Amino acid sequence: MCPGEFDDIDSLSTTLRPRQAGTSGTFVLKVTEGPDRGKSFELDESTPTTILLGQSPACSVRLSDRSVSRRHASLEICDAKLRVIDLASSNGTTLQGIMISDAFCSGGELLRVGATTLRVEVRSSKALLDLPEAKSFGLTIGRSAAMRRLYPLCERLAASKVPVLIEGETGTGKEVLAESLHCEGPRAEGPYVVFDCAAVPANLLESELFGHERGAFTGAVATRKGVFERAHGGTLLIDEIGDLDLHMQPKLLRVLERGEIQRVGGREALPVNVRVLSATRRDLDREVQAGRFRDDLFHRLVVARIELPPLRRRREDIALLVRHFVEQLAGEADAISSELLARWTDYAWPGNVRELRNAVARHLAIGELGGLPVFDDDLDDAPQSLDAEAPQTPEVRLPLALELPLADARQRAIEEFDRRYVQGILAAHRGNVTHAADAAGVAKRYFQLLKAKYLSRG
């Protein structure tokens, strides 16, 4: 996106796999049959992202076997086991002679892809470098090993110019990490702009990205800058990049390669100096394999990648996050009891950090009167107000929507809480958005989005 953008790629190559503290096992894949016989690939447990196996140059385990797909399988070390996921390959993946789609290896197994056989071996544990003692990186919070192992990498990437893909489940904090990379880097004084591919209709994508000239189409009553122009001199986060319309992908690629945009209806090429970060909840490797995401755009965006772990894999961060959210929401220090915190620590949190924040906000606002169980998988532990015979408080009771699937019912209850919370806090501050946002402990821009979402409906 700007001159010298990739000058520091080589210097980053040693930081893409930071080591964990203590001791850790290492998996070695040895090719015992096939064109690459005799080669071996070492997979360290400290590797923070998914490892690709296939013919593509993007693959860390790169094979020359023509019967192996470009992105044949992904590998990930989880709890001292090697997880192997077939990426819809042409010839499939077998483990110990059994065709698999997703399986775990513990060592000694034979893995076959195409005409290549690899033996999975475990190398004896070795001492690794200590992790930093930090409990945060910028706005990103966490002192678990899963998070602290990422911080050295994040520090190097923040100081660099290279594009970064941030991956992770919904609610893991991808946008927060992106803002942290911006704030901790040399462009911190420049603009930080977020563009959500999933929130814009396909027919408006080009205009939102690159802007438009007056009269370019019906309704274009004035010239408007797109997100690339607004992010000039700073950072642009393209959120949910995996949802970007396939027809828009070559146009985005052209902008990334040339460092210039052309507004819709315009003829002049406008140079832009933007550091591009992207985030997705999707498996982009699978999307490329399925033909839904361009291979060349993938390579342009994924110079470096960070995968944020789900909250269930960093439970030791829950107490720290709860204290942070209580403080952020101006709650009492002892608002969350130790008993409740213990239950939250045991919960799987499918909505990850976002769901945890909502739980804290809900508890601070309405305690056990909300009619929403703390744990949807344990109705026996639900607040007494769930009992049909118990008195209800109409002003705060949320719908359980038991006729819906769990995820949909949870989302409906959270949205209803958010709507009533925004409505109530606005009323308390006589409609003043700035004061209401301050009282809610959120950015004014975010509060305005909530207000537009929940209170502008007919």
Image (cartoon, helix red, strand yellow):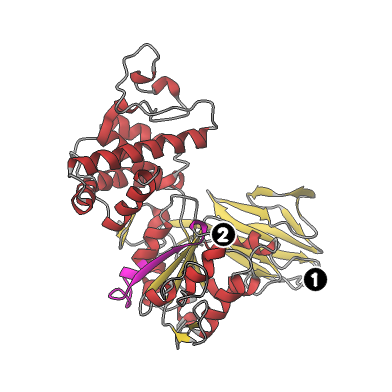
> Could you say whether the residue bearing mark 2 is in a helix, strand or loop?
helix
* Viewer can see residue 163: no
In the rendered image, residue 132, in percent from the top left (x then y), is placed at 33, 62
Q: Is residue 206 left or right of residue 327?
A: right
In the rendered image, residue 435, in percent from the top left (x then y), is placed at 18, 51
The image quadrant of residue 413 is: top left
**Label whose residue precedes the other's in the sequence (1 or 2):** 1
Q: Are marks 1 and 2 in contact (CB under 8 Å)?
A: no
Q: Is residue 394 magenta?
A: no
From the image, which quarter does the C terminus lie in? top left
In-front residue for pair 183/234 = 234
The image quadrant of residue 292 is: bottom right
Residue occupied by mark 1 = 66
In the rendered image, residue 163, in percent from the top left (x then y), is placed at 48, 74
Q: Is residue 196 magenta?
A: yes
Looking at the rendered structure, the kind of residue marked 1 is Arg
Q: Which residues are magenta?
A: 181-199
Residue occupied by mark 2 = 243
Q: Considering only vertical position in the picture, is 59 above or below 82?
A: below
